Image: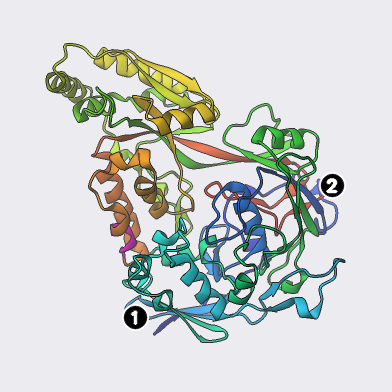
């Protein structure tokens, strides 16, 4: 066995990169910034606090503050130990053995007061991780994350119902030694272990909830920085809250939790969350678009985690024709926008956005997307002529690209479409829609071309490619390619860059998803806050090391 030992994390290096990392000059800082009572807001009631199942941003935020896993990503994007002291990997890359800390505890609040009794916490053991993986891969559970873990031994047969969940390749060698066996070496595996789907689950407590696990404040336990003290939601009422207190059972020198509590008000929309921020009832908010916030007064941090690209309706009478799609792809002159885009957008030639990292570096720094530039106006005209011939038409009627106006300002798309019009002689207009209208049109197939926001559900190229399998409107862009499985079976991290690039090239050559822009997702906070960490992929906001100097 070859052994990789990772020193336990410190509080200041505990989080995923991105978020509010400064709060003005040092003169503004008073004290340590710890002990603050954070007011926060959620744009909707969490659908579930079950980490093996939940996926909406409100749930992701609470889960991030409620649980912790074997490993996590630090600020640089590197994977470090959390509840594992260290781990070893076999020579063939298929057997991972984790030595767990014996001071990570489950806490379940049974007191009326805010004290922690000795009977309310007990160690997280290897069996809790084994049970979590069995639940995750149980076909009866229908976890949306099960497919991400098909690298684990016997997982595919378990998911198909051929084996019982006990056959899953996760075993507790003793209370604090966990062994996970893979079907094949998988460079993505450690990254997958940083996601909530790999968080532990205590079997005895799970059974005691009688089918309500994660659905109310009596049906959740914590092994992370905070625990749920109260969760009240009435869809027809007001004063809906989810109140979390610092989990002192898990305090240790190398894992400091700084706020005293986080009190979430549950709002009905992002607009209401912004109103809470305006009224200083929440310290921060997240959004795809921000405007009107003075950077001298607020900390505004954006990460380019979304790729905006053109998709074509495979059932459209014209744009189901591959040659016509190629004509549009070859005529898109992105360089005409060079120097005109504001900081919200970046020209995109590739599929994977810059926020995706490998070994602490942006994938886009390791593999320039200029290699995918397909501008060729002569070829565009040739493809258009071939499309007309195949469609038996003399001209292509005008078309509108539908756009979610809450995601992006479409004025830059107008500039690109004008260039396409000049090259192809086709009028291409823009139709701005609300999010609801846009999603309904996509779901109903009521579009010819759409500017589609592609965003993965965790920080990985694997997750980006997984969207082409999971998202119905992107499946036609994948064709018969087996991208997800080929990436999953990539044996080493060093090979991931080449594998990602090859997958991008193969998808782009289907000419069904044409990337145009990389788009920011934002967190905005008052200047007296520091180290509120935002994950633009899951939408979670992490308060565990947040400081406030007000």
The circle drawn on residue 312 is none
Residue name at image x 47 percent, y 59 percent: 143
Q: Is residue 36 left or right of residue 370?
A: right
Q: Looking at the picture, tell me which residue is in the foreground, 501 or 112.
A: 112
**Residue 350 visible somewhere in the drawing:** no
Q: Is residue 355 left or right of residue 526?
A: left
Q: Looking at the picture, tell me which residue is in the foreground, 235 or 41.
A: 235
Q: Quadrant of residue 384?
A: top left
Q: Which x, y percent locates residue 333?
A: 33, 25
Q: Which x, y percent locates residue 437?
A: 50, 26
Residue name at image x 61 percent, y 52 percent: 59
Q: Is residue 309 left or right of residue 131?
A: left
Per the rendered image, the range of residues in magenta is 486-490
For disc 1, the marked residue is: 91
Question: N-terminal of the two: label 2 or label 1?
Answer: 1
Q: Would you call the spot at circle 2 few (<14 residues within 10 Å), some (14-19), or many (20 or more)?
A: few
Identify the residue at the far right of this view: 113
For disc 2, the marked residue is: 550
């Amino acid at each position: 066995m070859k052994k990789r030992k990772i020193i336990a994390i410190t509080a200041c290096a505990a989080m995923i990169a991105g978020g509010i990392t400064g709060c003005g000059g040092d003169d503004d800082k008073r004290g340590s910034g710890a002990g603050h009572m954070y007011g926060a807001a959620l744009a909707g009631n969490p659908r579930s606090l079950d980490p093996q199942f939940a996926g909406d941003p409100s749930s992701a935020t609470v889960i991030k503050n409620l649980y912790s896993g074997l490993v996590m990503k630090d600020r640089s994007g590197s994977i470090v130990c959390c509840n594992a002291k260290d781990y070893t990997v076999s020579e063939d890359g298929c057997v991972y053995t984790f030595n767990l800390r014996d001071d990570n505890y489950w806490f379940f609040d049974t007191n009326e007061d805010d004290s922690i009794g000795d009977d309310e916490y007990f160690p997280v053991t290897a069996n809790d991780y084994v049970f979590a993986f069995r639940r995750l891969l149980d076909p009866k559970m229908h976890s949306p994350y099960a497919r991400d873990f098909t690298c684990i031994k016997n997982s595919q047969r378990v998911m198909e119902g051929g084996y019982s969940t006990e056959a899953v390749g996760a075993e507790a060698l003793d209370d604090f030694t966990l062994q996970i066996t893979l079907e094949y070496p998988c460079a993505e595996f450690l990254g997958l272990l940083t996601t909530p789907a790999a968080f532990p689950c205590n079997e005895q407590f799970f059974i005691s909830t009688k089918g309500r696990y994660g659905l109310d404040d009596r049906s959740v336990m914590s092994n992370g920085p905070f625990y749920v003290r109260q969760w009240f939601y009435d869809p027809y009422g007001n004063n809906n809250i989810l109140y979390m207190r610092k989990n002192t059972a898990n305090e240790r020198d190398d894992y400091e939790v700084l706020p005293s509590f986080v009190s979430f008000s549950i709002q009905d929309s992002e607009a209401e969350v912004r109103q809470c921020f305006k009224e200083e009832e929440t310290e921060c908010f997240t959004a795809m678009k921000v405007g009107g916030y003075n950077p001298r007064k607020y900390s505004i941090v954006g990460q380019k985690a979304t790729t905006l690209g053109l998709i074509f309706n495979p059932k459209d009478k014209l744009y189901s024709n591959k040659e016509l799609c190629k004509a549009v792809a070859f005529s898109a002159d992105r360089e005409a926008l060079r120097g005109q885009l504001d900081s919200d957008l970046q020209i995109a030639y590739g599929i994977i956005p810059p926020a995706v990292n490998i070994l602490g570096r942006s994938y886009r720094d390791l593999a320039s997307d200029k290699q995918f530039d397909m501008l060729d106006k002569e070829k565009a005209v040739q493809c258009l002529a071939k499309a007309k011939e195949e469609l038996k038409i003399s001209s292509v009627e005008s078309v509108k690209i539908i756009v979610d106006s809450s995601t992006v300002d479409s004025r830059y798309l107008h500039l690109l479409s004008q260039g396409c019009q000049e090259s192809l002689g086709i009028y291409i207009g823009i139709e701005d829609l609300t999010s609801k209208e846009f999603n309904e049109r996509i779901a109903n197939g009521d579009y010819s071309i759409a500017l589609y926001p592609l965003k993965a559900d965790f920080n990985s190229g694997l997750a980006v490619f997984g969207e082409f399998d999971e998202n119905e409107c992107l499946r036609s862009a994948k064709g018969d390619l087996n991208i997800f499985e080929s990436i999953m079976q990539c044996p080493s991290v060093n090979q991931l860059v080449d594998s990602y690039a090859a997958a991008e090239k193969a998808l782009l050559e289907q000419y069904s998803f044409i990337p145009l822009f990389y788009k920011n997702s934002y967190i905005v906070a008052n200047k007296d806050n520091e180290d509120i960490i935002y994950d633009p992929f899951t939408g979670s906001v992490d308060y565990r090391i947040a400081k406030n100097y007000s």
